[in-house]
Image (cartoon, rainbow, N blue to C red):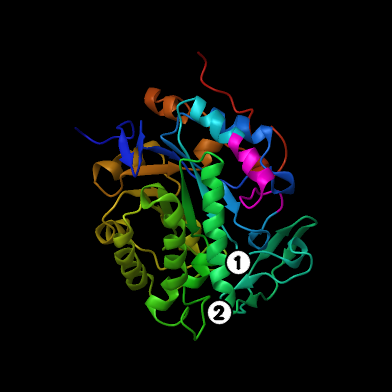
Amino acid sequence: MTTSLFSPIDIGAIRLTNRIVMAPLTRMRAPEQIPTALMTTYYQQRASAGLIIAEASQISPQGIGYPATPGLYNDEQVAGWKKITAAVHAQGGHIFAQLWHVGRISHPDLHHGELPVAPSAITPKGQAVTPSGYQPFVMPRALAIEEIPGIVNQYQVAAKNALEAGFDGVEVHSANGYLLDQFLRDGTNKRTDSYGGSMANRARFLLDVLEAVISVCGAERTGLRLSPSGTFNDISDSDPVTFFSYLLGELNRFNLAYLHIVDALEGDIRHGAKTIDIAILRHAFKGILITCGGYDQARAEQTLAAGLADAVAFGQLYIANPDLVERFKQNAELNQPDPSTFYGGNEKGYTDYPFLAA
């Protein structure tokens, strides 16, 4: 049978009815870091996706980098997510949590004056999003080696909380210049201890986290997101092809539910990214591969037909088209997303995008 976006697929312990994945999308509509009823409506509307990967959720207060983003570290958050997962499951959908620590991509205003943390004390270029608006990033505090096991444990606890909240599994967020990605890359990791220097040392923190999460969820309910070609959040590596080829080889022993790759984006290329062809990553990784990064339906179908990925995740198209699966099936016109409503606000640009007429 020809593989298409509408073909079913087994991802770890879950059988998906199609290969159309809703990418994790930060929307900043969780005041006090607690999921809301409005978020329940938003996710329920999009439950026809083969898999929803929920917006990134902090594993701890230290992991916060943006206002009004949800967490998975206290009982109120778990209770809020329970309503969302139940609503998605009631529609026959599947949903994974995404576990997040932003590292240096934060600001003291989000941490009661405390500095953000990072592998090394290097100030990122750009501005932080704070409750009072944009502010320049500050120099982060380098994590002491004895602090790292505690953060690994926070990932493990957040994974337990995700299962308690009814998620079908979790995705470890190690992309887009956040904490785990900062440890992977030699542009941000200048450590001289066992978490820096060699490829094995730079990979150690992520592999420790994966082992901790798998001990709770099982490999069949654990996914991972990477952005090997990414430059977002001032991230870089001197030789990403060699490093990520090595890392994916290490990942093969985990038998993950899937690996989720953020493909090179226009902005990455514009910022001088050393891009990695998806074919190289496909060859290195032996499991289920999801790709994302500005795909439309035609490019997604071509990617699946070429065997370069097993499923494709869509971001902005899912913001504006809650019934994206049906629109793809009918080759129907797509709603256009409104970038002014992407981050923060109410139902406008969130739950009010129209469905196809019945």
Q: Residue at x 72, y 40 (%)?
A: 345
The kind of residue on which mark 1 rests is Gly
Q: Residue furthest left?
A: 1
Give the vertical position of 201 relative to 6 (above or below).
below
Between 15 and 182, the one nearer to me in the picture? 15
Q: Which residue is tagged 1?
A: 103
Span of residues in magenta: 67-82
Which quarter of the figure is the N terminus placed in? Answer: top left
* Residue 332 place in picture, x, y as percent: 44, 24
* Residue 328 place in picture, x, y as percent: 40, 29
Q: Which residue is tagged 2?
A: 145
Residue 55 visible to an observer of this rendering: yes
Q: Residue at x 54, y 70 (%)?
A: 149
Q: Which of label 1 and label 2 is nearer to you? A: 2
Q: Secondary structure at mark 1?
A: loop
Asked if residue 136 lies left or right of residue 122, the reply is right
